[in-house]
Amino acid sequence: MNNVAIPILALGLIAGAFAVFSVAIASITGPKRYNRARVDAYECGIEPTPQPMGGGRIPVKYYLTAMLFIVFDIEIVFLYPWAVSFDSLGIFGLFEMFLFSASVLVVYAYVWRRGGLEWD
Amino acid sequence: MELNNFILLSAILFSIGAVGVLVRRNAIVVFMSVEMMLNAANLAFVTFAKANGSIDGQVIAFFVMVVAAAEVVVGLSIIVSIFRTRRTASIDEASLLKF
Amino acid sequence: MSSALIADITAPSVNYYMLAPILIVLGGAVLSVLVEAFYPRESRRSAQIALVLTTLVVAFLAVLNIKVDAILGFTIVNSLAIDGVSVFLQGLIILSALVGALLISENRIDPLGDAFAAQSSALPGSEDELAFTERGWYQTEIWSLFLFSVGGMLIFPIANDLLTLFVALEVMSLPLYLLVGMARRRRLLSQEAALKYFVLGAFSSAFMLYGSALVYGFANSVELGDIAKALSASAANSNLMLVGGIFILIGLLFKVGAAPFHQWTPDVYQGAPTAITAFMSAGTKVAAFGALLRVFYVALSGLAWDLSAVLWAIAIITMLVGTIIGVAQSDIKRMLAYSSIAHAGFLLLGVIAQSKAALDGSLFYLAGYAFTSLGAFAVVSLVRDASGEANHLGQWAGLGKRSPVIASVFTLFLLALAGIPLTSGFVGKFAVFAAAYEKGLAPLVVVAVIASAIAGFFYVRVIVLMFFTDASGDEVSVVVPSFATAAAITITAVVTIVLGVIPQPVFDLLSNALFLK
């Protein structure tokens, strides 16, 4: 049990050290300029999405996107057990997983063709 | 680790969910309570899998998660369509159909 | 430890021959999603109808192709059981779905189009809705949902483990929740029915899942056969198993509409588009009773003694609630819903009795009820006034004078529901009651006979209303339907009579119907 935990622990330590190191080195060596973009929430440089204030409502298109995300995201869960036991399942497992992905793709085609992916 | 504690926790979560469905009035909260019941069942499955040394329970948990996601999508679409019509998500307001 | 378990995993053997009906229906459903994606709007509806009907016919041929004597067995790591009962129920479900599809395809009755909203995402009463309706759009996704639901129904009664049972239950129910909420007329009512059905359905399936978890903890397996073995091996029944078994039964009893889990039935039957009501009253009932019979006969028979008090109480309450509250109804769809609750109560006698005769009787009863119920709701969809269907009983007064044919056909269905001789309803009821009596369930049979008599009253009341009462003055007309609905009503009426007059061929068919344990 111990020898399994050690690499994971080591990975965690390295990752933590890297994060601390990057932030520290940036604040020490980087130039210090302050503007509005710096204090906004980080959204890849684009304008942050307006938040509804005082009980305002979020547009329904967010709901559609969120639902699509949940449905497609959760299907991945079946890939993990298959990947773990790939060797013992062999060609049968590969074929079944191909079929499974194809049927997910069919739904994707439906969403795409019917405009579910268009934002406006 | 005492596995009984996990079973107890899952029973408590399930009961909170069941009571939530029965007493809360907001459709979204009722719906969250149902999801809690499903997850309580997941916890029980995984615990029993650990206790019995079989892998079935863990695999079942995956399936339950997927089914729960599908249920979320269907349920929310029904709730949203009702909300857009009536501007409320209260279960009590939905009372056109009565004995 | 976990790596050792993973090494045990091998590719399962899949018997595609035995699974053909399910694979065909689900494959058709996937194709139907592709039709939605790539066909232009104008040709979508006809393409979908052609696809659905072809799929169902081919699936039925695949069911006929399964030789019950030659090939019986489990497949996909024992998760599905193909036995005499499975083959019979699958055939029955596909035939009900075919009749249901004919009813759903109807677009002549309503001058605006079919029974479904032109765009169910448009707000009821909004400008958008009006515009979509005027353009004559159809919501063709109903066909994909319909086929997925049929696929779930085909798996539900043949599931041999609790996980497959749960997944099949959801595949069957989730599309139905949506279909219930998509009516063209009275949309608020329809959406509300969908919400109620969904919340209560999700609640009960959560109970079933938690029950499965407890049973898994007790038996260390979710396979029905293993559970039965674990039950017989343990000297004293554990509370884990008892509570788990009861939770599973709650989930299944909800789906069959047994009291006290019946509250959704009248609301959903009333609010849903009538074609969907017809389809689910037949398909869901058959699939859910199939699953209930299998779980009870195969897995829980060791618990029969512990559960008998609970089941007796549920059967009695169901029969009485269905008939007594049914008498007070003034809406024809709600009345038929309470009648379906009462029938669930009668069928529970077959579940409790646990004998080959009771099983045969229950299966025959289901076959008769499925077609009668489909036919009755099909007739309900034809009687209309200016605002849509005329569901109030008062509006049916004097119908026999204006449309004697439709009134007579409806009378036939009502007599079958009441269990009058020479109809399928009588044979089914008689077979179930006789089997229950043989197993010493005389008190239950007495209650059932009394309940049948009370139920007979409200069926006869409608007949009297149609033929011997003068019209109240409401403008109600019987619409001449297209070929599809006419065919559906004819088929169901013929089946109702034929099963009542010559039931023996079906019972011969059922001689092979046993559960594989």
Image (tube, rainbow, N blue to C red):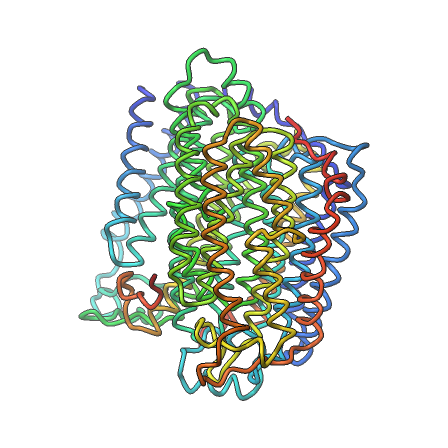
* Residue ranking furthest to the top: C235
Q: Nearer the viewer, residue A78 or C376?
A: C376
Residue C297 placed where, x, y %?
Answer: 57, 30
Q: Give C463 or C118, whichever is nearer the viewer.
A: C463
Please indicate, yes or no, whether residue C68 appears anywhere in the rendered image: yes
Q: Where is residue C207 in the image (x, y as percent from the top left)?
A: 39, 40
Give me the residue at 51% from left, 69% from top: A116
The percent position of residue C116, horizontal first and vertical second, equals 53, 73
Number of labels in the image equals 0
Foreground of the two, C371 or B76: C371
Residue C314 figure quarter: top left
Tell me the residue at 60%/23% (across/down).
Answer: C7
- In the image, residue C354 sits, relative to residue C464, either above or below, namely above
- Is C8 on the left or on the right of B34, as rendered? right
Q: In the shown orientation, is residue C504 left or right of residue A65?
A: right
Residue in front for this viewpoint, C57 or A106: C57
Q: Image height check: is A50 above or below C214?
A: below
Whole-percent x and y of residue B44?
38, 31
Would you say B68 lies left or right of C398 here? Answer: left
Q: Image quadrant for the C terminus of chain C?
A: top right
Residue drawn 43% across the image and 28% down it: C307
Whether residue A68 appears in this view of the structure is: no
In the picture as drawn, the residue positioned furthest to the left comes out as: A54
Task: State whether residue C175 is above or below residue A96.
Answer: below
